[in-house]
Amino acid sequence: MRLLTAFAIVLHVLLSLGVIALVLLHSGRGGGLSDAFGGGLSSSSLGGSTLAERNLNRLTIIAGVLFGASTLLLTFVLN
């Protein structure tokens, strides 16, 4: 049981760091991941989001859901 708890805590910490990193990659009012890799010029003429931004959004949502699930798992394991 202690091994499962330790694994859950390590997973939770890794997920929290991943969510922080993914959120920081998102663009604010200007710039962001698409501009960092040269996608800002083409996206301004099209007015839509680039493939990199959509994938970043998907990864952030998945990491957030997994983080929430690991929070619930830790709540039940540690009680």
Image (tube, rainbow, N blue to C red):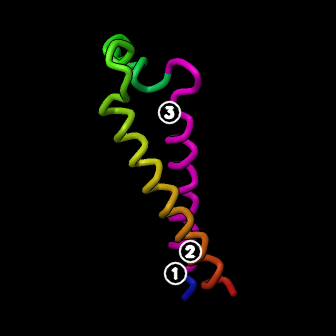
Q: CA distance from mark 2 to mark 3?
A: 29 Å
Which residue is located at x 46 percent, y 48 percent? 60
What mark, if any, has residue 6 been given in the picture?
2
Judged by depth in the image, the label closer to the viewer, 1 or 3, is 3
Q: Nearer the viewer, residue 78 or 6?
A: 78
Distance of mark 2 from mark 1, alpha carbons?
5 Å
The answer to whether the residues at label 2 and label 1 have Cβ atoms under 8 Å apart is yes
Q: Residues within 10 Å of mark 1 (few under 14, many from 20)?
A: few
- Residue 41 location (% of width, % of height): 35, 10
Q: Which residue is mark 1?
A: 3
Span highlighted in magenta in the image: 5-31
Q: Nearer the viewer, residue 16 or 48?
A: 48
The percent coordinates of residue 78 (x first, y second) are 66, 83
Seen from the viewer's position, the closer of residues 44 and 75 is 44
Which residue type carries mark 2?
Ala
Tally the numbered discs: 3
Q: Position of residue 42 (x, y in %)?
A: 31, 14
